[in-house]
Image (spheres, rainbow, N blue to C red):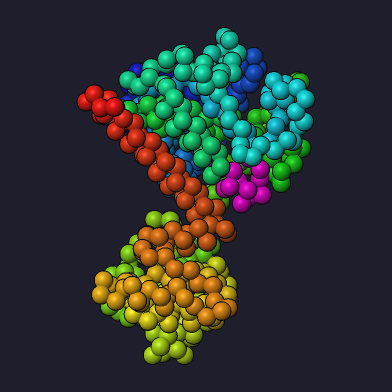
């Protein structure tokens, strides 16, 4: 890889120019705190930071969060898109601790923010990275990548920041570790889009295993050291290594699955649409053919086969005309059942009632579209799977951003044409 000129150098990393509008982010064996008032060399930190960042970005990419990350280059560097960085740190807090308590006297440590608390800080080492209000950010009229940061951009970054925190919080929670707060930064890519940028490593967050502050494994250990010793730095390094290694468990095998049971092979196209949508959420979806009317015993045998697996399962019944499949499954299964009938124009208004009007003691829901059935199944399985939960949250956020972008484009077009 042809490494170009140095574009930027900070306390813990260097950014080099690469071809094709890409950059190399090279980490240093250095740790700093308190706006560089405390700085120490820490052998091995560059490799740990790079491994941590790459695993986090790979996880975020899997669930659908847009970032500048492209790939890992070496033990101490990764390749990413060249973005014009917005000099704002976006901080999300779940628990009140650290500097928040100093700036907000009277708030007790441990206060839980729901929803998470969002703060912004202007990156200026000389001024101590002062906290800004959104009004100050708008008034500053910062322009990066041809984009002037206004209310629209603030709304988008606010939404992304909270979503990124929540999905990482969910992943850490699955590993019995509490994400207390974290900071991230954004950049503008070559197409004018706001994306997550910079680096996310153990300098970026507070992590408390089992929710216990005494067990913290983040940079706060270094911040609170009165005297810097070799043993103290080794403790910090071991903590950072522990975090990086735990990230290997961020993406476990799917804990659950969906099973589409079709009343006829003629429903296969409908069933495959459901399966394809399920794949987008990252869980397995199998397709079977069985008729509750014509082969009740076999239907119940298939049901027992899947229930014996001992994993969360959602059954999706695809049956046209008189839907006996969904109600029979619901009446004999402990797992949730979704009706998704392939309704036809001729008798659709009559056939749908066999999915809607059910005997007492049955709880199967009815969703008309294959996409909707997959969404419903994903939301059910997300109760036990943080990856599915996070994929849902990321997709919802991306939809929110697209609608907001579309609204602005329509308003700009109308204003350009003189419409009122």
Single out the residue that lies furthest toward the top: 126
Which one is in front, 13 or 410?
A: 410
Left or right of 410? Residue 158 is right
Single out the residue that lies furthest toward the front: 420
Tell me the magenta residue range: 168-182
Q: Position of residue 66 (x, y in %)?
A: 40, 38
Task: Give the image quarter of residue 22.
Answer: top left
Task: Give the image quarter of residue 235.
Answer: top right
Which one is in front, 150 or 164?
A: 150
| Count of numbered circles on the image | 0
Q: Position of residue 130 (x, y in %)?
A: 59, 15
For the point 40% across and 88% down, the residue is: 293
Q: Is residue 353 above or below residue 119?
A: below
Q: Is residue 302 above or below residue 280?
A: below
Query: In this orientation, does residue 79 appear?
Result: no
Q: Is residue 166 magenta?
A: no
- Is the C terminus in the top left, top right, bottom left or bottom right quadrant? top left
Query: In this orientation, does residue 32 appear?
Result: yes
For the point 52% across and 52% down, the residue is: 389
Q: Is residue 243 above or below residue 387?
A: above
Q: Is residue 19 above or below residue 393?
A: above
Q: Position of residue 150 (x, y in %)?
A: 42, 22
Single out the residue that lies furthest toward the left: 417
Q: Position of residue 223 (x, y in %)?
A: 69, 24
């Amino acid at each position: 890889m042809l490494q170009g000129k140095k574009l930027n150098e900070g306390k813990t990393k260097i950014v080099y120019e690469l071809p094709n509008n890409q950059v190399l982010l090279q980490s240093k064996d250095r740790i700093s705190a308190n706006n560089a008032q405390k700085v120490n060399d820490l052998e091995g930190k560059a490799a740990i930071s790079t491994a941590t960042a790459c695993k986090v970005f790979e996880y975020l990419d899997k669930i659908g969060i847009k970032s500048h990350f492209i790939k890992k280059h070496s033990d101490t560097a990764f390749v990413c898109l060249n973005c014009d960085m917005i000099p704002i740190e976006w901080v999300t807090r779940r628990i009140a601790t650290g500097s928040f308590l100093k700036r907000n006297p009277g708030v007790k440590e441990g206060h839980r923010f729901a929803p998470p608390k969002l703060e912004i800080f202007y990156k200026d080492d000389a001024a101590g990275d002062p906290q800004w209000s959104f009004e100050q950010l708008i008034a500053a009229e910062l322009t990066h990548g041809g984009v002037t940061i206004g209310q629209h951009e603030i709304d988008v970054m606010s939404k992304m920041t909270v979503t990124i925190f929540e999905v990482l919080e969910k992943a850490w929670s699955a590993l019995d570790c509490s994400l207390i707060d974290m900071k991230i930064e954004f950049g503008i890519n070559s197409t004018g889009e706001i994306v997550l940028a910079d680096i996310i490593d153990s300098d970026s967050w507070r992590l408390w295993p089992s929710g216990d502050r005494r067990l913290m494994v983040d940079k706060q250990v270094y911040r609170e050291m009165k005297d810097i010793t070799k043993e103290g730095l080794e403790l910090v390094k071991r903590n950072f290594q522990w975090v990086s290694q735990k990230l290997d468990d961020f993406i476990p095998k799917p804990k659950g699955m969906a099973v589409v049971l079709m009343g006829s092979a003629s429903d296969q196209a409908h069933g495959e649409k459901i399966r394809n949508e399920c794949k987008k959420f990252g869980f397995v979806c199998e397709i079977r053919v069985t008729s509750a009317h014509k082969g009740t015993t076999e239907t119940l045998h298939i049901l027992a086969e899947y229930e014996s697996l001992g994993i969360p399962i959602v059954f999706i019944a695809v049956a046209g005309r008189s839907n006996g499949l969904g109600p029979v499954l619901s009446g004999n299964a402990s797992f949730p059942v979704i009706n998704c009938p392939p309704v036809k124009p001729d008798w659709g208004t009559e056939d749908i009632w066999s999915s809607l009007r059910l005997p007492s003691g049955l709880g199967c829901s009815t969703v008309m579209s294959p996409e909707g059935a997959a969404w419903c199944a994903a939301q059910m399985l997300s109760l036990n799977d943080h990856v599915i939960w996070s994929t849902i949250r990321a997709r919802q956020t991306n939809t929110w951003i697209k609608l907001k972008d579309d609204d602005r484009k329509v308003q700009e077009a109308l204003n350009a044409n003189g419409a009122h």
